[in-house]
Amino acid sequence: MALTKGVTEEHLKMKVFPYTLKDKAKMWLSSLRPGLLTSWTEVQNKFLEKFFSTQKIDALRDKNHAIQPIGR
């Protein structure tokens, strides 16, 4: 993915993420203290803890690792 110079993929994900949410997920994110989540990994982990069971999280992580592009 081509990004603007100085903008990381992690930063872009964190900026776009709120616009992908609706209903309970949107309310959850807006209820968090500003600055609480400072990395994309923190956002992912908190979101998954809140909205997915442990089994579903493990399955999604396994699927995500299985489709990672070569060289990452």
Image (cartoon, rainbow, N blue to C red):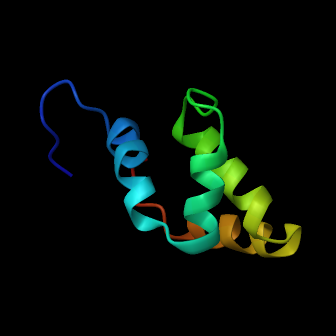
Q: Is residue 14 above or below residue 47?
A: above
Q: How many marks?
A: 0
The picture quadrant where one finds residue 12 is top left
Residue occupying image coordinates x 87% and y 67%: 54
Residue occupying image coordinates x 12% and y 36%: 4
As drawn, which residue projects farthest toward the right?
A: 54
Q: Indicate left or right for 23 with 57 as reference.
A: left
Query: Can the viewer see residue 70 in this picture?
Result: no
Q: Indicate left or right for 17 with 35 as reference.
A: left
Residue 53 is situated, as x and y percent measured from the top left of the image, at 84, 71
The picture quadrant where one finds residue 8 is top left
Query: Can the viewer see residue 30 in this picture?
Result: yes
Q: Nearer the viewer, residue 50 or 53?
A: 50
Q: Indicate left or right for 47 with 66 as reference.
A: right
Residue 20 is situated, as x and y percent measured from the top left of the image, at 42, 66
Residue occupying image coordinates x 57% and y 30%: 34
Q: Nearer the viewer, residue 5 or 19?
A: 19
Residue 32 is situated, as x and y percent measured from the top left of the image, at 66, 41
Residue occupying image coordinates x 67% and y 71%: 60
